[in-house]
Image (cartoon, rainbow, N blue to C red):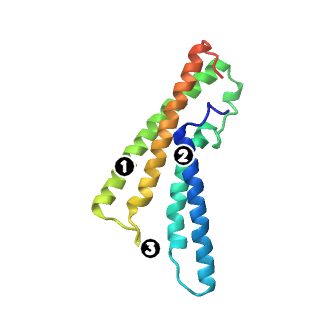
C-alpha cells in the first residue's frame, strides 16, 4: 500500500541515486576499457562501492513510502481494519525509534572517523566518513519519511474513527 505522495526529500534522494547510477556506470565502463588497454584504474571498484552505498541509502525513503520492502503480513492481513491501522502505527513508532538510534550511532561513528582520519584499506585509501556520511544522510531521510508517514496515517486514523486502512 502506498502512503501518500513522495515528498521533496524522497524525490531528491531518487534523483541523486539516479545521478550516482550514471556516474557508477561511467566509472565501470571506464574501468573495463582501461583494463582492456592494460591501464590500472582503481576508481572503478573502490569508487563503485562508495557510490553504491550512497545510491542505496538515498533511495530508501521512497521504498519505505511505497512499502516496497519485504514484509510478512500474512497474519496482519486477517485482522480487522482498526487493529491493522493501530499495528501499522505502532510499527512506525518502533521504526522511528530504531532509525533515531541508527542515526545517532552513524553520526557518532562518522564524526569519530572524520576527526581521527580513519581510512579504508584499499589502494585509494578513501576516508571512511565518506561512506558513513552517505549512510547517515540516507538514514536521516528515512527518519523524516517515517515521521511523515506516521503523521499521515494518524490523521487518516483520526478522520475515519479508527478504521484507517
**Is residue 73 found left or right of 41 in the rendered image?**
right
Distance between mark 2 and mark 3 Cα atoms: 31 Å
Q: Which residue is mark 1?
A: 107
> Residue shown at 64%/38% (left/top)?
66
Q: Which residue is mark 3?
A: 122
Quick one: quadrant of the N terminus? top right
Q: Mark 1 or mark 3, which is nearer the start of the sequence? A: 1
Q: Mark 2 or mark 1, which is nearer the start of the sequence? A: 2
Task: Report x, y in % for residue 58.
Answer: 53, 49
Q: Is residue 8 above or below residue 86?
A: below
Q: Mark 3 or mark 2, which is nearer the start of the sequence? A: 2
Could you classify mark 3 by the number of other residues whose Cα lies within 10 Å: few (under 14), some (14-19), or many (20 or more)?
Answer: few
Q: Which element is circle 3 on?
A: loop
> Residue shown at 62%/20% (left/top)?
83
Task: Report x, y in % for residue 2.
Answer: 66, 33
Q: Nearer the viewer, residue 106 or 22?
A: 22
Q: Which residue is mark 2?
A: 12
Q: List the single residue furthest toward the left.
A: 115
The quarter of the picture where residue 124 lies is bottom left
Distance between mark 3 and mark 1 Cα atoms: 23 Å
Q: Is residue 38 above or below residue 125?
A: below
Could you classify mark 1 by the number of other residues whose Cα lies within 10 Å: few (under 14), some (14-19), or many (20 or more)?
Answer: some
Quick one: quadrant of the C terminus? top right
Q: Which element is circle 2 on?
A: helix
The quarter of the picture where residue 159 lies is top right
Amino acid at each position: 500500500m502506498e502512503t501518500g505522495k513522495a515528498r521533496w526529500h524522497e524525490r531528491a534522494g531518487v534523483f541523486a541515486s539516479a545521478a550516482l547510477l550514471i556516474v557508477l556506470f561511467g566509472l565501470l565502463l571506464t574501468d573495463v576499457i582501461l583494463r582492456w588497454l592494460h591501464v590500472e584504474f582503481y576508481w572503478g571498484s573502490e569508487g563503485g562501492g562508495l557510490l553504491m552505498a550512497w545510491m542505496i541509502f538515498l533511495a530508501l525513503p521512497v521504498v519505505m513510502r511505497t512499502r516496497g520492502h519485504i514484509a510478512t503480513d500474512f497474519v496482519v492481513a486477517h485482522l480487522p481494519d482498526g487493529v491493522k491501522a493501530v499495528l501499522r502505527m505502532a510499527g512506525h513508532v518502533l521504526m522511528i525509534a530504531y532509525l533515531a538510534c541508527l542515526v545517532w550511532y552513524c553520526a557518532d561513528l562518522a564524526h569519530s572517523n572524520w576527526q581521527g582520519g580513519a581510512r579504508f584499506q584499499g589502494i585509494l585509501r578513501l576516508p571512511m566518513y565518506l561512506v558513513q556520511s552517505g549512510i547517515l544522510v540516507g538514514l536521516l531521510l528515512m527518519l523524516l519519511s517515517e515521521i511523515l508517514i506516521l503523521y499521515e496515517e494518524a490523521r487518516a486514523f483520526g478522520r475515519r474513527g479508527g478504521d484507517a486502512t
